[in-house]
Image: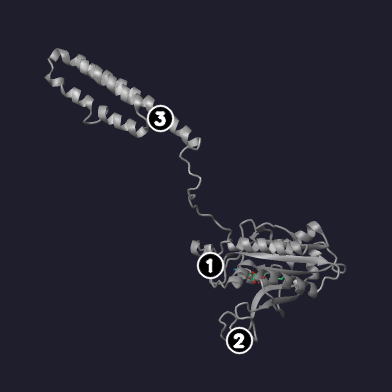
Amino acid sequence: MSSLAELQARALKEIREAADLEGLKRVEQVYLGKKGELRQQLGQLSSLPKEERPAFGKAVNDCKLAISEALEERERELQAAELTARLSGEGFDPTEPGQPFETGTLHPISQITEELVDVFQGLGFSWLDGPEVEFEYYNFDALGIPGDHPARESHDTFWLKDGNVLRTHTSPVQIRAMERFGAPLSVIVPGRCFRNETVDASHEHTFYQMEGLMVGRDISVSHLVYTMKTCLREILKRDIEIRLRPGYFPFVEPGFELDVNCPFCGGIGSPDCKNCKVCKQSGWIEMLPCGMVHPDVLRSGGLDPEEWTGFAFGLGLQRLVMVRYGVNDIRDFTGGDLRFLRQFTRV
Ligand code: FA5
């Protein structure tokens, strides 16, 4: 028994003196481990006379309890001390290199949207938003595309059960903007559009457009040309040539397809044009549809076409990024391949 009391005293002293958690673990092993001293004491049980065994068993248990409690208490003390040391900066080396962590980056469509908004705000345009679930009236009728109009067929529409649509373009916001703000008016409307189309390298069912609308007195095609040239020069970061070809959209008259000289070969006249696979030696790339706002559309927006004129355009944002960086498959934007997206990391 006396050796048990001596063991307990020795254990409690070593526990008190343990300087850190590792040292404490070692003390625990010495006394309570599988081959520890208390086990060895218990091994003597069978050699004792029967009547002494219960008292001895209880004494070993009491000793174990006392050691366990002391271990727990010292562990709490040491943990608190370590925490205090860490918080007070002991052992902290401010010259050690930091842990690297991965940062995300804005999606290229968001980046180009930000850049466009910046350029157009510089030209005095306001940035507007519009609903993605749209009334048939705004998406079609008010833009001169009634139910039986063939132009509806080129907009493979997602119709909703309640008769509304997922907007097929950002043009409905032209009407909403005129109704709400009247004239004069200069707005851009970047946003998501939806068409029930077969997806391929240049078509998505969900894509981004940016509508532009300027209405004022005596607004003419030259305002349109100047604005588009300024915008495309800023975005494509080079001097550009543009040309207008006739294009048909029921909500503009006249309507145009605007082309830009090929950014990859430099256009006709440049030595690289002969082999250019992008413009196929034409020297031009189709960029966006645009035109002068149709008088009926001005009327739908509550404006008098005798007093007001305007231009409008509808820029495909994926298309713009594709032309700017030479991306040849539109599906890459939503494919989720981080190697593709990391190429657009801004520094
Ligand atoms: C329109 O959507 C007209 N609202 C544009 C407009 C506005 C004309 C104002 C005149 C005045 P269009 O269907 O061509 O036009 O689409 C315009 C651009 O959106 C296209 O040039 C293309 O870049 C992009 N686009 C159209 N459909 C898709 C699609 N399925 N996937 C990706 N981009 C598309």
**Which quadrant of the rendered structure holds the C terminus?**
bottom right
Is residue 141 visible to us here?
A: no
Which image quarter has ligand 1?
Answer: bottom right
Q: Is any part of residue 16 visible from this angle?
A: yes
The mark lying in front, picked from 3 and 1, is 3
| Mark positioned earlier in the residue sequence (2 or 1) | 2
In the image, residue 167 above or below residue 6: below
Report the residue marked by disc 2.
Answer: 271
Of the residues shown, which amino acid type is indicated by label 1? Arg
Q: Residue at x 47, y 34 (%)?
A: 85
Residue 331 tag number: 1
Q: For the residue labelled by badge 1, is the local secondary structure a helix, a strand or a loop?
A: helix
Name the residue at 31% across, 25% down: 14
Q: Is residue 222 above or below residue 195?
A: below
Q: Quadrant of the N terminus?
A: top left
On the picture, is 219 further left or further right than 138? Answer: right
The secondary structure type at the circle numbered 3 is helix
Which of the two discs, 2 and 3, labels the residue nearer the N terminus?
A: 3
Q: Position of residue 240 (x, y in %)?
A: 69, 77
SS type, badge 2: helix
Under mark 3, the amino acid is Leu
